[in-house]
Amino acid sequence: MGPPGVGKGTQAKGIAEHYGVPAISTGDIFRANVRNQTPLGLEVARIMAEGSYVPDEITDAIVRDRLAEPDAAAGWLLDGYPRTLAQVEALDGVLAGAGHGIDAVISLVAEEAHLIDRLLKRAELEGRADDNAETIKHRMEVYNEATDPLIAIYRERGLLVEVDGLGTVDEVGQRITEALDATPAR
Ligand code: B4P
């Protein structure tokens, strides 16, 4: 978990590889659908371009189906999900039904000013539809309102692993794996 640009997608791939589990990124799944102009992609393209969240029912169904795929049977890393209280509850329901649990919730932490710089740099490199000054501001607001409060829920459950998101990609990655390795298996 963490605000836009903090390194969720960047780190998710490395962590998943390290532990031999699939990285499931709701953002990547939506972007692939937008690129391929699927019915889902056509539905979510405008929502994403303006920096708002895709409705919970759509997002929850995608994650539920993806977690049921064979490669996720022995473990997974969720990137960018859950992002709302309803998504936390939906994930709890899916996991309870499957008899699985969450080992840890990684919260990447960094100041907003650094993140805005990163996202504006990515705009130059990748040209993502949601990386422009106005949309980034909206994404930060949506994050602060809908997602940041969820961190307290996972802290109360004793699952939160807070990691400083500033530094090189490798430095942050190493902090994450060190923190996870020190977390008792559940
Ligand atoms: P995401 O794909 O999750 O996008 P993001 O929050 O911007 O983070 P991302 O993972 O891409 O960026 P990262 O921090 O790795 O979501 C996009 C949209 O999809 C949402 O706005 C929403 O519309 C929709 N969506 C996704 N999940 C949803 C959900 N659960 N519910 C509803 N809607 C949902 O990296 C940012 C940049 O920083 C990169 O350019 C990277 O190279 C750079 N960077 C990373 N680490 C760095 C470091 N240590 N130093 C320097 N640069 C670094």
Image (cartoon, grey):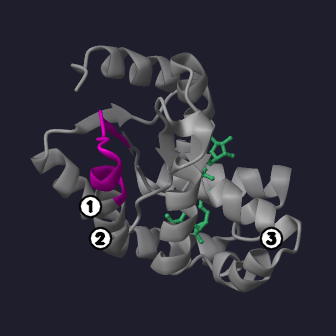
Q: Which amino acid, by three-letter code, is at mark 3?
A: Val
Check mark 3 vs ligand 1: CB closer than 8 Å? yes or no. Answer: no
The tag earlier along the polypeptide, 2 or 3, is 3
**In the drawing, does residue 33 fall left or right of residue 84?**
right
The front one of 132 and 181 is 181
Determine whether 147 is above or below 81 in the image.
below
Which residue is tagged 2? Answer: 85
Q: How many residues crowd around disc 1 within 10 Å: few (fewer than 14), some, or many (20 or more)?
A: some
Which residue is tagged 3? Answer: 34
Residue depicted at 86% across the width and 66% down the height? 35
**In the drawing, does residue 107 fall left or right of residue 4?**
left
Q: Distance from label 2 to label 1 (Cα)? A: 7 Å
Give x and y (percent) for residue 167: 51, 28
Whether label 2 touches label 1, CB < 8 Å: yes
Q: Which amino acid, by three-letter code, is at mark 1?
A: Leu
Toward the left, the furthest residue is 156
Residue 128 seen anywhere in this rendered image of the structure: no
SS class of the residue under badge 2?
A: helix
The front one of 123 and 153 is 153
Q: Which residues are magenta?
A: 94-107
SS class of the residue under badge 1?
A: helix
Residue depicted at 58% across the width and 64% down the height? 62
Quarter of the image for residue 163 reads top left
Q: How many residues crowd around disc 2 within 10 Å: few (fewer than 14), some, or many (20 or more)?
A: some
Which residue is tagged 1? Answer: 150
Determine whether 97 is above or below 23 in the image.
below
The front one of 166 and 14 is 14
Toward the right, the furthest residue is 36
Which marked residue is nearer to the observer: mark 2 or mark 1?
Answer: 2
